[in-house]
Amino acid sequence: MKLLIAENYEALSKEAARVVAQVVKAKPTAVLGLATGSTPIGMYRELARLHREEGVDFSRVTTFNLDEYVGLPPHHPQSYRTFMQEHFFRHVNIPLEQTNIPRGDAPDLQAECRRYEEAIAAAGGIDIQVLGIGRNGHIGFNEPGSDAETTTRVVKLAQSTIKANARFFDSIDEVPTKAVSMGIKTILAAKRILLLASGEAKAEAVRRMLEGERTPDVPASLLQLHPDVTVIVDKDAAALLAAETRGRGRLV
């Protein structure tokens, strides 16, 4: 894994946007795997600026998001479709029909999972997959226990994930307990992976991902199986890394 250590969240976000923009410039028809959550918001903001001020063109890009809550329709204020519209899609020139997010309200969720896998394959696979990391080491909604052979499926959310996401809802009781999520195998099939982590709350998960053994107990550690992973962390998220690991990283 290639490690980049940013001075702060702003620097992390700008570097992440630079990496994604490079992919789009090199391949205008790029297929982007996208993530939600607090961490990538700064990256989306910077990508929107690059589109607005420097002409980065998303008109031929296709996107696939990692996940969606089960039970929430696309127009729900806390759906990931709404999140992506608010933070990214409406700020750039990507046609809506080229954006893909699992339907958490699909009448047949198993069929929706199969459809999503088939759509990714039909698009030619994902050129770069953006990831965050949960405090328990999850990527997407692949909670501890998820192995490297999992594909898009319905997952039960860990209580720690539900608690962490409660800040987006009026109460913890409103947080969905299940989600449709790309699996580890689906994520590892991407040509490149870009993982972002910010803040001291993520430091232990980052340490276990980079320095620990590969284990389903820390799903992010399975990224060690991929040949082209870039990890961008701010200094707080890098705080628990060994000096040797930090020494291999590049400051941005």
Image: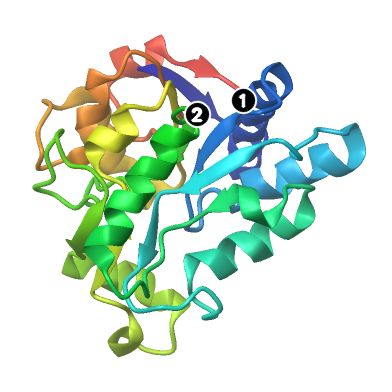
- Give the mark nearest the N terminus, 2 or 1: 1
Q: Residues within 10 Å of mark 1 (few under 14, many from 20)?
A: some
243 vs 82: above or below = above
Residue 48 numbered tag: none
Give the structural element (helix, strand or loop) at label 2: strand
Residue type of the residue flagged with mark 1: Val
| Foreground pick, 176 / 9 | 176
Q: Is residue 245 above or below residue 94?
A: above
Q: In this rendering, is residue 224 above or below 176?
A: above
Say which amino acid is labelled 2.
Ile
Report the Cα–Cα distance between label 2 and label 1: 9 Å
Would residue 195 be seen by someone viewing this image from the given angle? no
Q: Position of residue 10 (x, y in %)?
A: 65, 42
Q: Element type at marker 1?
A: helix
Q: Residue at x 8, y 47 (%)?
A: 145
Find residue 238 and report its horizontal and vertical position in percent: 39, 33
Residue ID for mark 2: 128
Q: Is residue 6 visible?
A: yes
The residue depicted at 80 percent of the width and 35 percent of the height is: 57
Q: Mark 1 = which residue?
A: 19
| Above or below, comparing residue 171 to residue 217 in the picture | below
